[in-house]
Structure formats: structure tokens, C-alpha cells
Amino acid sequence: MKHLSEYRDAETARRLAAEIRRTVTRAWAIMEVCGGQTHSIIRNGIDQLLPPEVELIHGPGCPVCVTPLEVIDRALAIAARPGLIFCSFGDMLRVPGSRENLLAVKGRGGDVRVVYSPLDALKIAREHPDREVVFLAIGFETTAPANAMAVKLARERGLANFSMLVSQVLVPPAIEAIMRSPGNRVNAFLAAGHVCSVMGTWQYPTLAERFGVPIVVTGFEPLDLLAGILAAVTQLESGRHELENAYPRVVTERGNEPAQTVIAEVFAPADRVWRGIGPIPGSGWRLAESYREFDAELRFGVGDLRAVESSLCRSGEVLRGSLKPDECPAFGRECTPRTPLGATMVSGEGACAAYYNYGKAHTPGREGGESR
Amino acid sequence: MCLAVPGQVESIHEERGTRMGRVNFGGVVKEVCLAYVPEIAVGDYTIVHVGFAISRIDEASALATLRTFEELGLLDEGLAELSGDESAAAP
Ligand code: SF4
């Protein structure tokens, strides 16, 4: 893994930043879609290296943050059932539902288990054939290959006690929704490299063309991010709007075809509600008809559960890029990672938590050109 | 769960018909599903999401990316000399 440290080289970072500074002549807003990138940007102070003309808007690409309250409430209702084993990625446990979170259910004696992979949940199902085992399958295109395979294997191995609560979301429809939203300020996108490593880049040229917006596939290391920002600024300054792959060491045009095949077999396109943003047509996956017997929503009859959002949290504006986390009145006061009011404060990949954890509280100034 | 971790494949085996492997993440070894990377071999690097290898990292293209950075650095210095631009200094 020797080469990885070279992608963090400080001298090259400064050179890339200088090149961005030399290229830029006017103000541009660039959205990094992925929460992992937001995290890396704040932790490494990438935004501090940029000239004032270049503003980074933190996008909705944190699956924990955009999982709708209804799904959390459905998870809570299922997890509270006696005898059932509820499995989830660790970062979902503290996400607030309407009244409580999964940790509270666990505290009352619910069997809620943190797993690293959906395969761990399958293993638990095999070890406890007499108990229902439910996995909360959330995430972007990056978790879909794993979650789809888990369902496929559950069928192949005859694990009838296994089911999944699915809330998969997709990046391209989110980009489209952001570009269509009134008051959109985004001039260019950094597309998430790992999403594209699964799905390829073939969906993006049409989006770039249709909305006249540069889309640059970008990695997560500081140098990758700076190279992606430079590519976006260069396109913007020269009036181009194309798909560009600034992460070719991982991403190919076609993506991972074996993974796409299994996803297409197990999942079907679905409309999804994004927490803080609202419904986006075709923006997710659910289980395909032929796999409905593994659908926890149907098995436990929680599909009709509806929920209402708290009024204090402004994560919707944060997720749409119209409010910086530290501009929320509750930030660092009523709302901290220990007492999160919104999902963007819970997940390490959420913008509010990234700002809180890395002590990012610049003096409020909405207009972008604030001193850095 | 989105933060994908790169690691090196140490060994490959079959588990009930599914291709699995042991992958070393900087000292921590985990069992990973290799079904989606049929071409991967012991010693290769891969990026892993929630227990599944999704892509092989090709060391050659990794080095090519680095060379691009280096070229850019050189180009960068050349431009700075030409224009007497001191913006290369850290802010
Ligand atoms: S700081 Fe807390 S209350 Fe404010 S938007 Fe973020 S998560 Fe919501």
C-alpha cells in the first residue's frame, strides 16, 4: 500500500492548489456528492487551500443522513419484536427516529447487532434457524452489490428466516434533482469515485450534457480531490461541461459488470424519499418482485408506517447545500454528535459531524467569499 | 459504511460455492467476498466495501496517476517562473 501515502503528499497538494488558483477567474460552486469526500475535505483542510472563488458545497451523499425517518421508524418497529435479531451497520444505531433510536431498543433488551457486512447477518441467520434475522440494507451504489448478493445467497442456501429492510439510494437521480431544484447554485459536480467503480461512468455524460454541468469522477485522497477540483475549474473556465474521469486507477466506464448483473437480478428501480430533501423519482432500489419473500417490510407489515420530522433540525438545507452546518442555530448547542438532532450529525460522513469533529466553525458569513 | 478500505489479497478459497478471500488491511486481516472480482489473484490490491471486493487497484495505473501529478508540478513551476506569480506560497 506504499503508493497510497504518495497521494497525500503535501508539496504536490500545494502545487495543485496553486494551479487551481491560477486557473480560476470568477466564483464557482462545486458540489462533492459523497460524504466520504466531505469528510476528507474537512479533515485535510482542502477547503482552506482553495482560492476564495472556489466554494465547495457539501452534497447529500451520506446514506445514513438521507435514509428517511419512515425507514428508521420501520426498523425500530421490527427491531422491537421479541425473539427477532436485527442487524445493521454501526452508524445507523444512533440515528434518531420519530421517538427513539436503535440503541434505545437495544437498551430495552432488543437483540440489535452491529455487523460489518451483510454476510455477517447471513451467518447469524444460519446459526439461529429458529429466529427471524433482519438486515437494514441502506446505502448508495457502493453497498448494493453486497446487499444484493446477501439476498441471492439467502435464497440459494435456503435461509427462510432471513429478510431485508431495503432503502438503497442512487447518485445520478440525486444530481438531476439538485440541478432541477429552484435556486440551485451548483456549477459542477465531483462524482463519487467508489459509486462509479460499481456502476461505471456511462450514466453521466448525458447528465453533464443535459444540464450543462461538468461532472468529474473523483477519489478520496487529498490529492485526488484537488485534482478533481482542478479538472472541474478548468472545464468551467473554458466553458466545457463534460464527464471527466479523474480517478482512472479505480474507475472504468463500464464499472463492475458482475456486480451490476446481480443488482439487476435482485433489485428493481424505485422512487425514494430522501431525508431532508423529499421524494426523488427513480432514485433508489427495492427488492425485485421475484425476491419479495425476503422483504422485511412485507414480512412484518410495517410498509404503511408514516413519520413526521422534527422542526428544529435544518439538515434538509445542509443536504441541499444551501446552509453550512455551523450556520444552523442548533449546531454545537442543542445538537452535537452525543445528542444529535439530525442524521447529518450522527454519521461520521455527515456534514454536521465533519464540521463538529474537526473544529470547523468559521465566522458566519453567508456570501461565500469569506476569508479562509 | 461508504468509506471503502483498500487491502491486499493474502489467500483465496471457496465457501459453499462462493469465492472468498483473506484480505490484509494494513495488518488487520478480514474475510472478504471475491465473487465480483473474478480476475483477482493473491498479492493483488483491491478496494473493499462492506465485505465485498469491488475493484482491483492496478499498480501501473496508480503510478501513471502519480506521474501526471508530477508533470503538473513541473508545469506549475515553469508557469510560476514565467509569470513571477507568487501564489504558489501557502495561504
Ligand atoms: S447541526 Fe444538528 S440540528 Fe443543525 S442541521 Fe445539523 S444535524 Fe440538524
Image: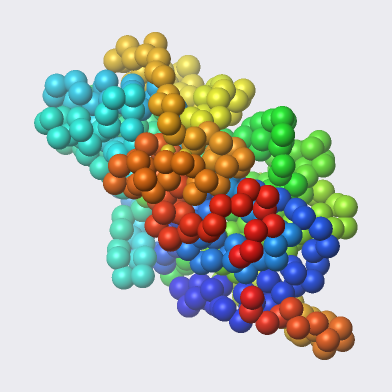
Relative to A291, is A150 above or below? Answer: below
Q: Quadrant of the C terminus of chain A?
A: bottom right
Residue located at (39% from left, 18% from top): A307
Give the side of residue A4 with respect to residue A295, left or right. Answer: right
In the image shown, does B35 or B26 lie closer to the viewer?
Answer: B26
Q: Position of residue A108 (x, y in %)?
A: 13, 30
Do we see residue B30 in this rendering? yes
Q: Quadrant of residue A82?
A: top left
In the image shown, does A216 or B84 lie closer to the viewer?
Answer: B84
Tell me which image quadrant ligand 1 sits in. Answer: top left
Q: Quadrant of residue B68?
A: bottom right
Give the side of residue A227 with respect to residue B8, left or right. Answer: right
In the image shown, does A176 or B83 lie closer to the viewer?
Answer: B83
Q: Position of residue A183 (x, y in %)?
A: 72, 34
Q: Position of residue A238 (x, y in %)?
A: 88, 57
Give the side of residue A255 with respect to residue A143, left or right. Answer: right
Q: Quadrant of residue A54?
A: bottom right
Relative to A304, is A359 above or below? Answer: below
Relative to A221, is B34 above or below? Answer: above
Residue located at (25% from left, 42% from top): A114
Residue located at (76% from left, 83% from top): B86
Give the side of residue B44 with respect to residue A189, left or right. Answer: left
Do we see residue A252 in this rendering? no
State the residue lying farthest toward the bottom: B81
Q: Position of residue A293 (x, y in %)?
A: 36, 17
Residue located at (54% from left, 73% from top): A8
In the image shown, does A248 or A129 lie closer to the viewer?
Answer: A248
